[in-house]
Image: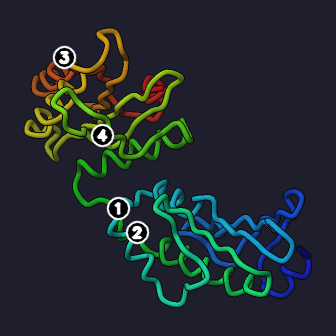
């Protein structure tokens, strides 16, 4: 693969990053922060290629508050004019084929990336609880990187699968994480608090007594209601309050 020729024929930026591997930056940006859409191109056999965004487009959307769902993934798969590229169940944009299809694959992959990027604002959560979870998620992504798991699922004592918005992978286990935001008046949403209390209680029943595998990240507040909510949740999980990003160091 000729990096200089590829850059000249497409207008993309091209950098060699290894044997038969090129880093490509498209002339279009993701979202509003100026980051260029990027792909890794590998010649996996003579005359053939494999192209991937290595999940970078989806990670950019998540970092800027977008909520990714299966239905939204399916909508991206219906992006017109993208027969040379696809997006996987794990939100990785890929393409592969013969060398003569490379240019079409580049632009088709970019179409999917731009379709996803164009939804960043629309796919941001609308409720206060969702916005708080997204805020926590964004901060934890910066601190923990790949250790952060989105939509962590685990089997509880009831036999039902429990879903938590976040999980933190440690050397020995995954810590279930539930952000709990406050209502507009600064008070806890008690129905949500009781729901979280019950969910963590279910998980506690199948956890070792000393296991630090349950964590509530509570939006910082004050007053009797807030203290009562913290006290209740502390019965089934470790609770930390979140006011500044440095507070989340206790989550790791």
* Disc with the residue nearer the chain's start (2 vs 3): 2
Left or right, residue 252 beside residue 184? right
Outermost residue on the top side: it is 210
Q: CA distance from mark 3 to mark 4?
A: 18 Å
For this rendering, which residue is in front, 47 or 76? 47
* Disc with the residue nearer the chain's start (4 vs 2): 2
Question: Picture quarter containing residue 228?
Answer: top left
Q: Which mark is residue 73?
A: 2
Q: Which residue is mark 3?
A: 235
- Residue 138 drawn at (x, y percent): 45, 47
Question: Of tags 1 and 3, which is closer to the observer?
Answer: 1
Q: Which residue is mark 4?
A: 164
Q: CA distance from mark 4 to mark 2?
A: 20 Å
SS assignment at label 2: helix
Q: Which residue is mark 1?
A: 69
Question: Picture quarter containing residue 199?
Answer: top left
Question: Picture quarter containing residue 231?
Answer: top left
Outermost residue on the left side: it is 191
Dots 1, 3 in contact, CB < 8 A:
no
Dots 4, 1 in contact, CB < 8 A:
no
* Disc with the residue nearer the chain's start (3 vs 4): 4
SS assignment at label 4: strand
- Residue 59 drawn at (x, y percent): 53, 56
Dots 3, 4 in contact, CB < 8 A:
no
**Residue beneath the point at 29% across and 36% down:** 178
């Amino acid at each position: 693969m000729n990096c200089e020729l590829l850059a000249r024929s497409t207008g993309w930026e091209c950098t060699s990053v290894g044997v038969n591997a090129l880093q490509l930056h498209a002339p279009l940006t993701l979202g509003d922060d100026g980051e260029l859409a990027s792909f890794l191109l590998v010649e996996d056999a003579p005359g053939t290629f494999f192209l991937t965004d290595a999940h970078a487009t989806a990670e950019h959307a998540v970092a800027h508050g977008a909520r990714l769902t299966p239905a939204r993934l399916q909508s991206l798969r219906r992006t017109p004019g993208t027969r040379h590229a696809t997006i996987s169940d794990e939100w990785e944009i890929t393409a592969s084929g013969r060398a003569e299809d490379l240019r079409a694959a580049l632009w088709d992959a970019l179409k999917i990336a731009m379709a996803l990027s164009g939804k960043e604002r629309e796919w941001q959560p609308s409720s206060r609880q969702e916005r708080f979870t997204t805020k926590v998620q964004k901060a934890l992504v910066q601190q923990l990187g790949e250790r952060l798991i989105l939509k962590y699922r685990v089997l509880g004592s009831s036999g039902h699968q429990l879903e938590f918005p976040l999980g933190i992978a440690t050397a020995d286990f995954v810590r279930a994480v539930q952000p709990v935001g406050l209502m507009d008046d600064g008070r806890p949403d008690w129905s949500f608090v009781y729901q979280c209390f019950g969910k963590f209680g279910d998980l506690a029943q199948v956890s070792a007594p000393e296991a630090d595998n349950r964590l509530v990240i509570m939006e910082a507040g004050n007053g009797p209601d807030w203290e009562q909510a913290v006290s209740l949740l502390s019965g089934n999980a470790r609770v930390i309050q979140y006011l500044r990003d440095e507070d989340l160091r206790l989550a790791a």
